[in-house]
């Protein structure tokens, strides 16, 4: 059966493939909290050193979004997604055999980081091209894979570590990742025009008619605009504090006397909040518009970090995990569509990848800084409040940015 003959619009299969891709990659990435204590004990490492494992991973998967997007724009998303997920599996096998922490840096930090970096942006950009009117819903469903991956990755790893140890757990995750690579690689496709189709399941565009999706800006053109750098700087500043909970919330709970198991539960709740937030805040864009909704994610995440800095009870930490996760999920869900609003679909993969590279810088520095602050001061409070302050700056500069429609009208063309 050809692509055009399927009863279900092919774009929804692309959404499914992107969902599975992100579920697979981020289940592995955000399972790190469950390994934190085991790695710290196994290699007699300090918290700053241990948290660097995840930070290398996060830095790479955001920084490599740009070359991954460029490659996918040229050859299509399928080979990049498939190859990226397989690389994650290889990295996990390397980490499973580590005899020193630097080998975990190599296998998990670099292997998983590069693998997620290759697969994430191409899958997100692929969904953007298959939808225009239903773009918000489609991308919300696709990136919910990150939330579901966060939801299941840490508890699955926690149970497996208790049963078979951390090394064999990495091998189990590697096998599951290989399966995810095959399935998601089969489902993710090029843009609908490549198959003679139109976005949203609309009738195919006749030959000679204007394209259904306007061409938009190249990466070079987008990078010369104020909205590009506003989004870039805002996301970069927020990212310094954004990933601190995914690394340090579990040991923080242990410090509060709540136990390692409760710490893993908090990571699960981050995933629950993230999944809900992707749908809830994607719908909010219909009321406030994407730019204002995006700004609201900054202020919400910042306020939740203030709450965390004062939290010592299980109830307070549960509330923080759910709400911070929701604002994080909304941030991830809205960002690609906001980029599409400003810059169109012509080079969307590379544009999104370039924007995410700023997040990589914050991800690399934020969690180790929080870990070393704890090692030095015996507290996370200063690092957490610094992250909240940076979120406030991101909120202000995003509010000062023009709405996409007004900005495009002033440019005299549409993306």
Image (cartoon, rainbow, N blue to C red):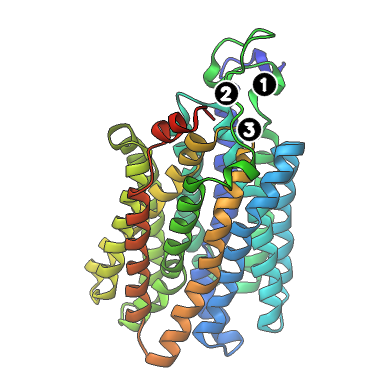
SS at mark 1?
A: helix
* Vertical side of 378 occupied by 23: above or below: above
Mark 3 vs 2, N-terminal side: 2
| Residue 349 percent across, percent down from the top left | 63, 42
SS at mark 2?
A: loop
SS at mark 3?
A: loop
| Residue 156 percent across, percent down from the top left | 51, 60
* Mark 3: few/some/many CA within 10 Å (<14, 14-19, 20+): some
Q: How far apart are the alpha carbons under marks 1 and 3? A: 12 Å
Q: Residue at x 47, y 34 (%)?
A: 341
Q: Residue at x 44, y 79 (%)?
A: 370
* Vertical side of 275 occupied by 194: above or below: above
Seen in the image, is 29 located left or right of residue 374? right
Confirm whether residue 382 shows in the render.
yes
Mark 2 vs 1, N-terminal side: 1
Disc 1 vs disc 3: which is toward the camera? 3
Which quadrant of the structure image shows residue 102? Answer: bottom right
Residue 346 is labelled as 3
Q: How far apart are the alpha carbons under marks 3 and 2? A: 8 Å
Mark 1 vs 3, N-terminal side: 1
Q: Residue at x 28, y 75 (%)?
A: 309
Seen in the image, is 90 located left or right of residue 163? right
What residue did someone put label 1 on? 193
Q: Residue at x 57, y 10 (%)?
A: 203
* Vertical side of 408 occupied by 251: above or below: below
* Mark 1: few/some/many CA within 10 Å (<14, 14-19, 20+): some
What residue did someone put label 2 on? 213
Residue 387 is labelled as none
Seen in the image, is 179 located left or right of residue 406? right
């Amino acid at each position: 059966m050809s692509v055009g003959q399927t009863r279900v619009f092919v774009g929804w299969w692309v959404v499914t493939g992107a969902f599975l891709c992100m579920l697979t990659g981020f289940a592995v990435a955000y399972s790190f909290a469950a390994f934190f204590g085991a790695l710290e004990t196994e290699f007699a490492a300090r918290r700053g050193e241990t948290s660097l494992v995840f930070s290398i991973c996060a830095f790479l998967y955001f920084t490599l979004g740009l070359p991954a997007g460029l490659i996918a724009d040229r050859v299509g998303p399928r080979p990049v997604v498939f190859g990226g997920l397989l690389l994650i599996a290889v990295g996990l096998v390397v980490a499973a055999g580590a005899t020193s922490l630097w080998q975990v840096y190599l296998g998990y930090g670099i292997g998983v980081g590069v693998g997620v970096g290759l697969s994430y942006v191409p899958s997100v950009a692929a969904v953007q091209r298959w939808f225009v009117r239903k773009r918000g819903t489609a991308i919300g469903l696709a990136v919910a894979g990150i939330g579901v991956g966060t939801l299941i990755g840490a508890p699955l790893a926690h149970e497996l570590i208790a049963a078979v140890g951390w090394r064999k757990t990495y091998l189990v995750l590697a096998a599951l990742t290989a399966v995810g690579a095959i399935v998601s690689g089969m489902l993710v496709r090029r843009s609908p025009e490549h198959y003679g189709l139109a976005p949203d399941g609309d009738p195919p565009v006749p030959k000679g008619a204007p394209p259904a999706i306007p061409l938009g800006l190249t990466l070079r053109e987008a990078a010369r605009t104020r909205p590009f750098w506003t989004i870039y700087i805002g996301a970069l500043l927020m990212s310094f504090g954004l990933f601190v909970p995914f690394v340090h919330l579990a040991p923080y709970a242990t410090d509060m006397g709540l136990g390692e198991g409760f710490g893993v539960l908090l990571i699960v709740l981050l995933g629950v909040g993230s999944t809900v937030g992707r749908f809830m805040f994607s719908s909010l864009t219909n009321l406030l518009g994407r730019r204002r909704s995006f700004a609201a994610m900054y202020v919400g995440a910042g306020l939740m970090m203030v709450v965390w800095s004062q939290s010592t009870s299980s109830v307070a930490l549960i509330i923080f995990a759910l709400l911070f996760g929701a604002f994080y999920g909304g941030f991830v869900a809205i960002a690609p569509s906001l980029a599409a609003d400003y810059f169109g679909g012509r080079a969307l993969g590379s544009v999104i990848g370039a924007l995410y590279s700023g997040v990589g810088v914050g991800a690399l520095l934020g969690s180790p800084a929080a870990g070393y602050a704890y090692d030095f001061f015996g507290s996370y409070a200063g690092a957490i409040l610094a992250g909240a302050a940076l979120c406030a700056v991101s909120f202000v500069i995003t509010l000062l940015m023009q709405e996409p429609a007004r900005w495009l009208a002033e440019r005299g063309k549409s993306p």
